[in-house]
Image: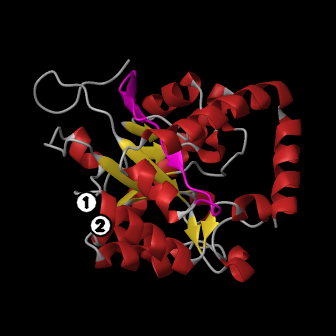
């Protein structure tokens, strides 16, 4: 189902870009999760600058915030958003300032078990990002890589505890989340809805917004460090080719994940080790 948003009966689609950390490659373990697999999603600062510059040239509007959609505010003809997963300290030290220099605000999703740990943001840094106009959301508590394979009770606990931690930290109800590890299922969204999460970002490369119970489900185009600024800009501006390539690869990976289970995770890690 595509959710009808905005005024009238027009059905809108939203382009969402999913980033992680920005850090020098030689020191990539200083922000976010460690390991070669996580490093695939970490851009170097000058590379991230080129991404922002390329995107700025091809989009005519600033990125919207999910709260605009949830409040049914008017949005551009081609709305887009930018998100950052995990809660690595580079979100505060390197990313937020760069976004604010061009007048952009973003969504930062926090794995709450890691708040204050080395390489992750502190409680005060998360609060400051919110004060500066960015949106804070849950990325689960412990960041299970096979999130969709967790029992329903575990899914509910991951969502509920992480939302409660962030809500207490910020002094306001946190209503949005993103799925850790890229593993999504309807049960994941149903568990999110059970815990009053109203918007859930996945890693499914689609512009369609679906409704699962009271939860809006939004796909994202994941940005990896090998992607050029032109590819990121093409996705942000709605170009078909880069979005289709990611969708096709995503569909292939879904089959492999289903058949491979834990073996897929080991294979992905081996690929990442070789890439490094």
Reply yes or no: does residue 223 show up in magenta: yes
Q: Nearer the viewer, residue 64 or 217?
A: 64
User: Which image quarter is the N terminus in?
Assistant: top left
On screen, residue 164 versus residue 265, left or right, reads left
- Residue at the top extreme of this rendering: 1
Q: Is residue 16 above or below residue 119?
A: above
* Colouring scheme applied when the structure was drawn: secondary structure
Q: Is residue 220 above or below residue 148?
A: below
Describe the element under mark 1 as helix, strand or loop.
loop
Q: Is residue 154 above or below residue 139?
A: above
Q: Which residue is mark 2?
A: 104
User: x%, y% of residue 90?
Assistant: 54, 75
On screen, residue 266 versus residue 128, left or right, reads right
Reply yes or no: does residue 44 show up in magenta: no
**Could you tell me if the residues under marks 2 and 1 are in contact, i.e. CB atoms within 8 Å?**
yes
Q: Which residue is mark 1?
A: 62
User: x%, y% of residue 152?
Assistant: 63, 26
User: x%, y% of residue 164?
Assistant: 46, 50
Q: What span is in magenta?
A: 207-227
On screen, residue 34 versus residue 72, left or right, reads right
Describe the element under mark 2 as helix, strand or loop.
loop
Residue at 46%, 67% (x, y): give it.
51
């Amino acid at each position: 189902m595509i959710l009808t948003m905005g005024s009238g009966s027009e059905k809108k689609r939203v382009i969402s870009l999913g980033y992680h950390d920005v850090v020098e490659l030689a020191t990539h373990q200083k922000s976010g999760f460690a390991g070669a697999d996580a490093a695939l999603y970490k851009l170097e600062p000058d590379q991230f600058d080129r991404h922002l510059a390329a995107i700025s040239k091809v989009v005519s509007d600033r990125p919207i915030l999910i709260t605009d959609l949830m409040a049914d505010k008017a949005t551009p003809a081609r709305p887009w958003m930018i998100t950052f997963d995990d809660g690595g300290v580079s979100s505060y030290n390197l990313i937020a300032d760069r976004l604010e220099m061009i007048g952009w605000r973003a969504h930062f999703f926090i794995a709450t078990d890691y708040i204050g740990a080395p390489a992750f943001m502190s409680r005060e840094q998360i609060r400051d990002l919110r004060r500066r106009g960015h949106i804070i959301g849950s990325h689960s508590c412990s960041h299970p890589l096979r999130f969709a394979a967790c029992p329903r009770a575990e899914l509910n606990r991951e969502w509920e505890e992480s939302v409660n931690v962030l809500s207490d930290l910020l002094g306001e109800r946190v209503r949005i989340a993103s799925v850790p590890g890229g593993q999504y299922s309807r049960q994941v969204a149903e568990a999110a809805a059970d815990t009053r999460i109203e918007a859930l970002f996945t890693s499914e490369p689609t512009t369609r917004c679906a409704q699962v119970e009271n939860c809006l489900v939004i796909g994202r185009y994941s940005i990896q460090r090998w992607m050029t600024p032109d590819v990121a800009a093409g996705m942000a501006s709605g170009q078909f080719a880069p979005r289709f390539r990611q969708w096709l690869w995503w569909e292939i990976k879904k089959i492999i994940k289903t058949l491979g289970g834990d073996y897929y995770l080991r294979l992905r890690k081996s690929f990442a080790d070789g890439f490094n």
